[in-house]
Image: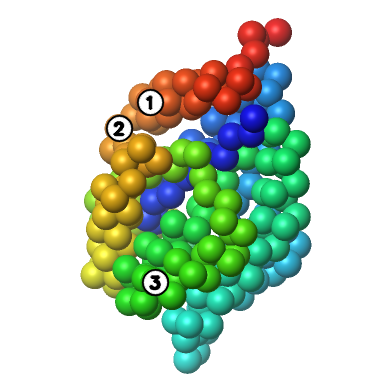
Amino acid sequence: MSLFVTFEGSEGCGKSTQAKALWKKVSRLGIPAVLTHEPGGTTLSKEVRYLLKKQRQGGISPLAELLLFAACRIQLVTEIIRPNLKQGKVIICDRFADSTIAYQGYGRGLDLDTIREINQLATEGIKPDLTILLDIPVEKGLDRKQTKAGDRFETEDIAFHNRVRDGYLKLAADEPERWLVIDATLPKVRIGKIIWQRVSRLLNKHHLSRTPG
Ligand code: TMP
């Protein structure tokens, strides 16, 4: 049985590092695992990612933004997620549909039910077995990114980022069995251990565990 794990969080929360570390750990056990991310992970999605993140005069309308993320997701689900889940693999995805609810819903203020309908279409109803939220105070996360020139999302105001963070916490509270919320200010190694505790249990449950060889 396959396993689908997603990582979520606001800017600078460290999810990409943890997603990669988890993928390495699972792969080292000889369990077939795929690491991917959103927006990205396919040729089309990489191109659209560039368009979405790039600073531009006049911006992008929130609805156009929503549909561009949905287009990236449909492509990723079609090319990578669905076929690999079908093969019984572990998929680790850095951001997924919950990002759209947090950013375009809570952040931009688009209607949550509309987003859920579009997410349903874009994901073909595929839901993560586990979603790991790396929760970090907004200023701390943005500070971690200060060395790079900010993209269209990173340069949004603090109020936007706080709405995104609060949105994530609401999503996690509404579905506690799917979400694992971790304090992202903890040391990286500690965070890795908390994640592994939960994932190794799920690997067993999904009959995916192997002895290291
Ligand atoms: P990241 O991969 O570096 O986190 O960049 C992706 C950016 O896109 C990040 O600021 C969050 C944003 N985003 C949305 O606004 N909605 C979405 O559905 C997704 C997947 C990402």
Residue placed under numbered mark 1 in the picture: 194
81 vs 188, nearest the viewer: 81
Could you give the CA–CA distance between mark 1 and mark 2, rounded to whole angstroms?
A: 10 Å
Above or below — where is 144 with respect to 121? Answer: above
Nearer to us: label 2 or label 3: 3
Identify the residue position indicated by label 3 in the image.
113
Confirm whether residue 177 shows in the render: yes
Q: Nearer the viewer, mark 1 or mark 3?
A: 3
Label located before the other in sequence (1 or 2): 2
What's the residue at 32%, 53% (across, down)?
171
User: For the residue carrying disc 2, how many other residues have a C-alpha within 10 Å: few (<14), some (14-19), or many (20+)?
Assistant: few
Q: Picture coordinates of residue 18 (x, y %)?
A: 48, 36
Residue at 40 percent across and 41 percent down: it is 178
Query: Is 2 situated left or right of 142 in this image?
Result: right
What residue is at 75 percent from the left and 55 percent from the top?
79
Please state if 41 lies on the left or on the right of 95 as rendered: right
Find residue 143 and name its label. Answer: none
Q: Is residue 41 left or right of residue 9?
A: right
Measure the C-alpha gap from mark 2 to mark 3: 34 Å
**Residue under label 2:** 186
Q: Quadrant of residue 154?
A: bottom left
Secondary structure beneath label 1? helix
Q: Secondary structure at mark 3?
A: helix
Q: Taking 66 as reference, is 144 above or below it?
A: above
Q: Circle 2 — which element? A: loop
Viewer-closest of 87 and 10: 87
